[in-house]
Image (cartoon, rainbow, N blue to C red):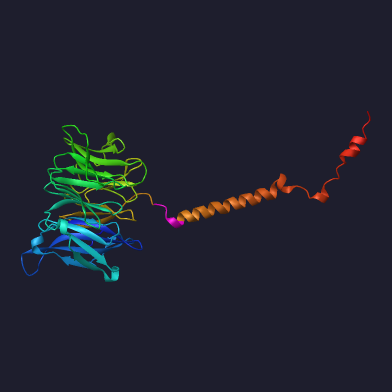
Amino acid sequence: MQGGAGGSVTCGSWIRRPENVNLVVLGRSTTRPDSSSSSSVIEIFSFDPNTTSLSSTPLARHELEESDGDPITIAVHPSGDDFVCSTTNGGCKLFELYGKETNLKLFVKELPPLENAGPQKCLAFSIDGSRFATGGVDGHLRILEWPSLRVIVDEVRAHISFQDMDFSLDSEFLASTSTDGSSRIWKTEDGRPFMTLARNSDEKIELCRFSKDGTKPFLFCTVQKGDKAVVVVYDISTWKKIGHKRLLGKPASVMSVSLDGKYLALGSKDGDICVVEVKKMEISHWSKSLHLGAAIATLGFCPNQRVVLTTSIQWGAMVTKLNVPADWKEWQLYLLLLGLFLASAVAFYLFFQNSDSIWNLPRAREQQTRPKIDSFVGGCSV
């Protein structure tokens, strides 16, 4: 449970690269040694699955202009080749990665529709990478086609101010939540507001994540009702509540779903995280006071390891190995199938060797000569 970078980490995310390599991108503020002023940087770190740790020095680094302000949030494209970072003053910036770990290069590219968009609270790519959505502090929703950047949705008053958003597994829907406690569902193909989720007057829907396991689709939402915090599950075929459960036991600041959809994670406003097995809706892992007394700003599952990345301004970045049952590896499945095949072959051989059934019929010359039918008839008297 080591972090490769401390200090004022404002945001972060995993980057899935070829050959099962995982990197971590962090946005943070640093103080220049020759002055009291501070600048913001985007840094890429390697991840070692054997030690569950980030590298001590970044593989690539980009220093933002002082006029850009601080990074707010980062969204990585599913390909792992580029990511978008929102800043407090400079709108959104597009970064592209080139090369491998030993020679990684980070380039900044123009992002015309979002250069002067203002601070964006939420950024999200669709699972297939064909859509990109932003939710502004000012409540402005934009959905762009990727990589053409064609504007699909440009809704100025989508919310009072965005709090969270997520794409469905098939990229058909976008769920979003507002600081006023409301939640809306959008059709991503044409940008139509599809519906507003039902809630009681004393309830606030705060965070939202779609299920990702490819079976019956659900929408998970954290709902605050007074001092009671629960996770509510909606069936997206009807958009009706089908159940709720008290899991974290306190207000959540961030929520995440693993790439395979097996686990749901919640981070609290005082530094705890809990990981829930979606199939049973039972807690599988607890980390108390992981970021002691600080709100967890980032919570993300490693693409192919049972490890989570968390960040907070006070404690920086941490990677934590989860205490959950190990997954079957591909080679283990093939080994199991081979074992079953060999066991079946041995059982069949033993059955053949010891059976008195038709498998061991006597040969033709060993059979007794059967009487001809005509001699049998001729030997009968009437």
Residue 170 in the image: state x and y as whole percent. Answer: 32, 47
Q: Is residue 162 left or right of residue 170?
A: left
In the image, 67 versus 366, the foreground residue is 67
Determine whether 353 is above or below 31 in the image.
above
Does residue 118 appear to the left or right of 350 in the view shown? Answer: left
Quadrant that contains the C terminus: top right
Task: Report the residue that reaches farthest toward the top.
Answer: 382
* Quarter of the figure that contains the N terminus: bottom left
Q: Nearer the viewer, residue 173 or 39?
A: 173
What secondary structure is the magenta-colored segment mainly? Answer: loop
Q: Is residue 134 visible?
A: yes
Residue nearest the observer in this picture, 300 or 33: 300
124, 339: nearer the viewer: 124
Relative to 379, 264 lies left or right:
left
Is 258 one of the magenta-colored residues?
Answer: no
Q: Is residue 254 visible?
A: no
Q: Is residue 99 above or below residue 361?
A: below
Residue drawn at x 23%, y 59% as measured from the top left: 83
Residue 333 pos. (x, y %): 46, 53
Magenta span has 330?
yes
Q: Start and end of the magenta stretch?
A: 327-331
Instruction: Tell me where residue 341 appears, x and y as whole percent.
Output: 56, 52
Give me the residue at 49% from left, 56% from top: 335
